[in-house]
Amino acid sequence: MEDAKPIDRSTGLSGMPSPKRMLWFIGILTVSMTVSFMTSIVLLYKFEIPAGNKETLVYMLGQLSGLTTACVMYWVGTTNSSGQKTDLLAKAQPVKE
């Protein structure tokens, strides 16, 4: 008989991180992206950009802007609400006919 592996409580049955841990991760990611974007905007107005780096900086800020928008839309869009609905449905009793 093989030795049983200890249960890893940090993940669910599918091997994915638990929903609570994922919410913490997504929350921290959202805050760090927002702070990074706002800091970049402030620094953009505070310091002069060398002409050779202007296009690269604009490109990178555009990417950062898109990623920040995606993180924030998770919370105010339908993704988070859909996940909550799925959790509620999983906990609900089956309908008896």
Image (cartoon, rainbow, N blue to C red):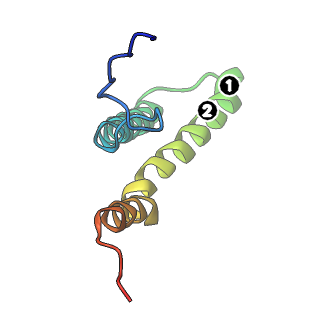
* Quadrant of the drawing holding the C terminus: bottom left
The amino acid type, in three-letter code, at marker 2 is Met
Q: Using residue 3 as the reference point, say whether residue 69 is left or right of it.
A: right
Q: Earlier in the sequence, mark 1 or mark 2?
A: 1
Q: Secondary structure at mark 1?
A: helix
* Residue sitting nearer the eye, 1 or 82: 1
Question: Could you tell me residue 27's position as x and y percent?
Answer: 32, 41
Residue 6 location, quadrant: top left
* Quadrant of the drawing holding the N terminus: top left
* Residue sitting nearer the eye, 42 or 11: 11
Q: Which residue lies at the image location 37% right of the left edge and 32% below the top edge? A: 11
Q: Relative to 51, say whether 95 is above or below.
A: below
Disc 1 marks which residue?
Answer: 51
Q: Nearer the viewer, mark 1 or mark 2?
A: 2
Disc 2 marks which residue?
Answer: 60
Q: Which residue lies at the image location 60% right of the left edge and 42% below the top edge? A: 62
Mark 2 residue crowding within 10 angstroms, few (<14) / some (14–19) / many (20+): few
